Image (cartoon, rainbow, N blue to C red):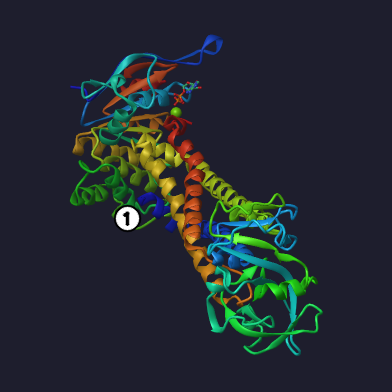
Amino acid sequence: MAVIELKNINKYFGSGISKVHVLKDVNFAADRGQLILVVGPSGSGKSTFLTIAGGLQTPTSGSVEVEGNSVENLSKAQRDKLRLNQVGFVLQSYNLVPYLKVKEQFDFVDKVKHQGNLSKEGLKGLLEQLGISELINKFPGELSGGQTQRVAIARALYADPDIVLADEPTAALDSQKVAEVGKLFKDLAETRNKAVVVVTHDLRLLDFADKTYEILDGKISLKDKEHVLDR
Amino acid sequence: MYLALKEIRHEKLRYGLIVSMIVLIAYLIFILTSLAFGLAGENTQAINSWDAKSIVLNKDSNISLTQSIITKDQAKDAKLTSKEAVIGSTPVVAKHKGKEKISASFIGARKSQFIIKDLKLTAGHKARNNHQIVVDEKFKTDGYKLGDKVTLNSFKDKYQIVGFTKNAKLNVAPVAYGTVSTWKYLRGMPNAAVTGSAIVSKNANYKAHSSHLKTYSMDKFISKLPGYSAENTTFGFMIGFLMIISLVLIAVFLYILTMQALPTYAVLRAQGIPAKALVSTITSQSLVLMASGVLIGAALAALTGWMLPVGVPMAFNIPVLIWISIGLMIMGVIGAAIPARKIATVDPVSVIGG
Ligand SMILES: Nc1ncnc2c1ncn2[C@@H]1O[C@H](COP(=O)(O)OP(=O)(O)O)[C@@H](O)[C@H]1O
Ligand SMILES: [Mg+2]
């Protein structure tokens, strides 16, 4: 069963003549253990799609289901809880609290979410898998772009969510780092049995995807990656 | 609290600067308050020591003790019990060769009535004749001793200091207690048919039964002491203003920091951190800043009080200072309210996309 599913999502912004139809009948499903890529040019509606999937915005019509439960019936507080427990976000920037050392980023999660986080050993394993064990006493300001993104991924996975949603996670990285992060996402999806959804205009990530959607002008379609590359 | 303290620890310079501003303001408030109480005390100490509830003055005296004269005729129907005492008051300058002149408030009163009867001496004895006086200890700190014979104003007569008393100040001048006859003499009317300047009573509803006299409550009388209300209003105004400055200061500071950190707060909200946790962060930061500022300010004020020369009228009224500290903490909470609102309403979507 799909761990997250979007059904017939439409999203309009504005009203009257300035009304824009940003998402058009979007259907989408993601399974555990897979890295799902949603690619599309800038302005095509990727971020809007991701925020609706993560319960940060409500669609104008259609429904979002996480583990079979529809998100639109949840209260604001319940949505906070959903994001705290079941969804991990990795964003382009600002992922880390600037005045907390790397290890304190995880301590802080413990303060807010009292159970269901990775164990000490679990975190140790995760940091090793991500190759950032040596960084735990550094502040975010002391990390390189690639290191920052890997710590952000660890931060998102620490709460042990079912779903990881990433928006342009490679925007600030060079090609070699992009490949590393792409491989990481794929490995994490597989070894930790997560549904990892990455929205990006960065086609360099295509090689790592298990499933690729393309979004153009708010319309989403499932593609095989050769087809996307053909364009 | 976790984030609050971590941030303060990480940004020592920033928070150190704001705390030092709060220290200065809190210090100024504490010193001003203590000065206000000190000065108010020097205005009223003597009156407070009488423990009287009301005072009868000539109704044309404009509630001024030194302007008031009560004639024997006006006082003929006034019943004086053990709760009443007649006083005659006039400002004097005390002189003694080789010593500093002292501006004092002379108060003439009857031996048999409560003002003199209840007078507590720290040394010597009470006045036994018209040429003896009991004076406030300020005379002692200025070098006067028991047995010294002083002149008052420009009269030739000598008055012997036979006793010292504590906390006897009126109109910011030390009091010299003598007899009513001496007072009449000093006022230049030794043989006039005059009772005194006023009748004070421990009875709040005392009536003198004369159309020329009027009874005022002690509080009213004190509020009309020369300069007393103006002084207290000025101090109150300054203290209130400093409170508001502290409020604006902390609000602006926290607001700027919050606006800078808004993307981080937005991401934390996206990650499902409850708004409540973030709002409590900024509020506890504000409280920590205010509390450290107030504590250091209080320590400095105490140090100042300890080092100041005796002459400076400072009275540390601890309950009032505690209330002021609580007031500053409340300012901190209010100051955090605007940034807290910003944080509570930040839209996580604003940082996603770009
Ligand atoms: N809050 C909004 N109000 C109005 N228009 C918006 C809003 N958010 C996004 N849009 C519009 O929706 C379209 C898709 O935006 P977005 O989802 O950010 O695209 P992408 O992430 O693919 O670049 C853009 O044309 C953008 O201007
Ligand atoms: Mg985007």
Label 1 element class: loop
Residue B228 horizontal side relative to residue B277, left or right? right
The image quadrant where one finds the N terminus of chain A is top left
Decide if residue A93 is in sight here: no
**Height in image: A224 above or below B13?**
above
Residue B304 horizontal side relative to residue A139, left or right? right
Rate crowding at label 1 as few (under 14), some (14 to 19) or many (20 or more) other CA atoms within 10 Å. Answer: some
Query: Quadrant location of residue A51?
Result: top left
- Spot occupied by residue B284 in the image (x, y as percentages of width and height): 41, 49
- Reading the image, the residue beneath label 1 is A136
- Spot occupied by residue B123 in the image (x, y as percentages of width and height): 55, 84
**Height in image: B331 above or below B181?**
above
- Spot occupied by residue B7 in the image (x, y as percentages of width and height): 43, 53
Front residue of B62/B166: it is B62
Mark 1 vs ligand 2: CB below 8 Å? no
The image quadrant where one finds the C terminus of chain A is top left
Name the residue at 58% across, 68% down: B314
Residue A42 horizontal side relative to residue A30, left or right? right
The three-letter code of the residue at mark 1 reads: Ile
Front residue of B47/B287: it is B47
Decide if residue B54 is in sight here: yes
Front residue of B169/A8: it is B169
- Spot occupied by residue A87 in the image (x, y as percentages of width and height): 29, 33
Q: How many marks?
A: 1
**Height in image: B298 above or below A31?**
below
**Height in image: B54 above or below A25?**
below
Query: Quadrant location of residue B136?
Result: bottom right
